[in-house]
Amino acid sequence: MRCVLAHLIGTDSERNSGMTMKIDSVIARQRVDDLEAAIPFYERLTGQQAARFAYAGVQLAGVGPFLLISGPDEAVQQAARVNATVATADLTAVIEEAVAAGATMVMPPQPTPNGLRAILRHPHGGVYEYVGP
């Protein structure tokens, strides 16, 4: 596992070679049947408090690198079509770079309770929600 991580993150000199980091974090999505029952596990696991909010017919809780999703089946299935949430400090630049590299815009940037979000399909088939200010 250490070899895989070292390969993915590179050496200090590779990380500091002048390339600008465009992705701040990736948030894993997890569907849960009972949001209130699931939150304590993730709070204990991460040592962080849950931030609860509602959006597009589902109840959500952000706990560290996890986004817990609960609600009516149809609304949750819509949210589950996205592989992960990618956070960035410069949403416009990341979208431009991704589209230039072959991504397809599924949903252009739109306001949400937590900033702007856009959905992109990567050239290899993955669908990702990108969020930023």
Image (cartoon, grey):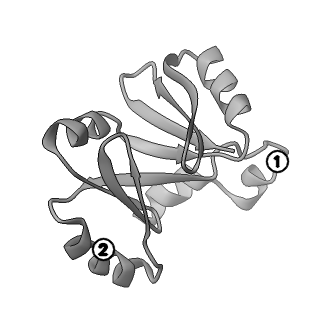
In this rendering, would 109 be left or right of 89? left
- The location of residue 104, given as percent across then percent down, is 50, 15
Kind of residue at badge 1: Ser
In the image, is residue 101 above or below residue 50?
Answer: above
In this rendering, would 102 be left or right of 50? right
Residue bearing mark 2: 39
Q: Which mark is residue 17?
A: 1
Kind of residue at badge 2: Ile
- The location of residue 77, given as percent across then percent down, is 21, 37
The mark nearer the N terminus, 2 or 1, is: 1
Q: Mark 2: few, some, or many residues within 10 Å (few <14, many ≥20)?
A: many
- Pick the residue in front: 59 or 64: 59
Mark 2 to mark 1 CA distance (whole Å): 39 Å
SS label for mark 1:
loop
Give the residue drawn at x 17%, y 36%: 74
Which numbered mark, 2 or 1, is in the foreground of this view? 2
In the image, is residue 49 above or below residue 122?
Answer: below
In the picture, the quarter occupied by the C terminus is top right
Give the residue drawn at x 73%, y 30%: 93
